[in-house]
Amino acid sequence: MIEAIYTFPSNFLWGTATASHQVEGENTNNDWWLWEQELGRIRNGHRSGKACEWWAGRWKEDFDRAATDGQNAHRLSLEWSRIEPMPGQWDHNAIERYREIIKGAIDCGLKPMVTLHHFTNPIWMVEQGGWLADEIVEWFERYTRLVVGELADLVELWITINEPNVFGYEGFLNGGFPPGGGSMRELYQAMRNMVLAHAASYHSIHEIQPEASVGVAHHYRGMNPARMWSPLDRWVTNFRSRTFNDSFPQAVSTGQFHMMGRRERFPQAANTQDFFGLNYYTTERVTFDLRKPTELFTRGFFPPDADLSPGDFIANEPAGMWKALQWAHGFGLPIYITENGVEDAEDRIRPRYLASHVREVWRAVNFNWYVRGYFWWSLVDNFEWERGWTQRFGLWELDVETQERRRRSSADLYAEICKANGLSTDMVARFAPQAFRSIFPGASLEKPEDQIAS
């Protein structure tokens, strides 16, 4: 077998991503904890409980594992409800705990990327109107200023809001997240307030820490018309993608917020990203469906021959990663892949998914697009929101009851990628042979002597 390797730049960041509520445990002062107590909100009645016991200190061993495996970065989030348990009241012990965690990452050689808001909200904030309240911009700016003032000496890379489109649609239209909304009006209000809150946060960070690099983790959902010959399918696919994928990043790029046929101009939001955070998981087919008003009269599905994760939640569509990178590149900013992953308790699809998607990232690097890093979701199995513990995204398996971590084969593959700063034919042949020909077209899995013998 002729050996080849897709090599990345020498300063490329290889890491994993986590979020506070999903890994810390016993996080009882936010809206998700309340949501978990309501019957029928979480699949199988699951609760976050101890999560991965990071608040109790298990982050140390997980960071050690990441560093041993060659990772040089980690994306984590702060829990607003721990830091500001009541309006204007700060828990400095919680801030010190986060300092300890972030410094622990740095001591392990992991560059921290810190997210200020990853889906969860303090109970007091929700009781006063949450993201529908005009005051949310002031509240979020106040929280930002306190946190950045305390942690600026440790953190250079900041993300203000994780996946504002997912948070908005699930919380204020589809109802899968708290507060369990259900109207286009509420969705619009929440999204516009997130644009304004992000802008205020961005300017505050740079006022306190001029050298900081600030962005948003944008979720890109790949969408293709179910029937290319159908003008209606093509139109609704474009409409759904523009509304779901484009509205927020366009607003924080141009200052023009356009959603649901409404337009507003927010000049303070223009050019409020120093980098573009890209979360990509999968691509679906889209068709027109009058029965789906909360999905913009569209229905998304995977084709019958899709390479699906065990729960049919994600289709392995690496070409969609390339399209997502093209989309992100269009904003003219450095790019970090802030999340990419697949749920797979048995670790069957994950190796080929990981290898195939890393190859698409390399294609962008090879075009001299400024892609600076890649963060796999996730380091260890964690509490997956409304899906509870039924989905396992970790490189490391977690036994929720005993908190034992067990290494998956994909952790070995990712370790080799990180340490080599690249993806080789040998790695793919050993860990993901099913994807070999698509990742290295023209190469052969056979050894030269085997080719002669045949």
Image: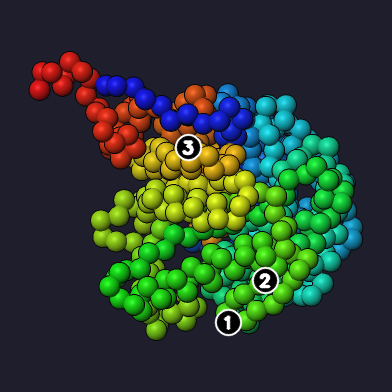
Q: Is residue 232 left or right of residue 336?
A: left
Is disc 2 placed on a helix, strand or loop?
strand
Considering every residue shown, the one lying at the far top of the view is 449
Q: Residue 163 placed where, x, y %?
A: 60, 59
**Towards the viewer: 93 or 6:** 6
**Towards the viewer: 149 or 20:** 149
What residue is disc 3 on?
A: 366
Q: Are marks 2 and 1 in contact (CB under 8 Å)?
A: no
Q: Earlier in the sequence, mark 2 or mark 3?
A: 2
The part of the image, by quadrant, that contains residue 195 is: bottom right
Is disc 3 placed on a helix, strand or loop?
helix
Eyeballing the image, is 388 above or below 286?
above
Q: Earlier in the sequence, mark 2 or mark 1?
A: 2
Cα gap from disc 2 to disc 3, whole angstroms: 32 Å
Q: Residue 428 placed where, x, y %?
A: 35, 31
Q: Amino acid at mark 1?
A: Gly
What residue is disc 1 on?
A: 261
Residue at left offset 59%, top offset 33%? 12
Q: Residue 143 placed where, x, y %?
A: 83, 57
What residue is disc 2 on?
A: 256
Considering every residue shown, the one lying at the far left of the view is 454
Q: Please state, as top left, top right, bottom left or bottom right, where the N terminus lies in the image.
A: top left
Eyeballing the image, is 295 above or below 393?
below
Q: Amino acid at mark 3?
A: Asn
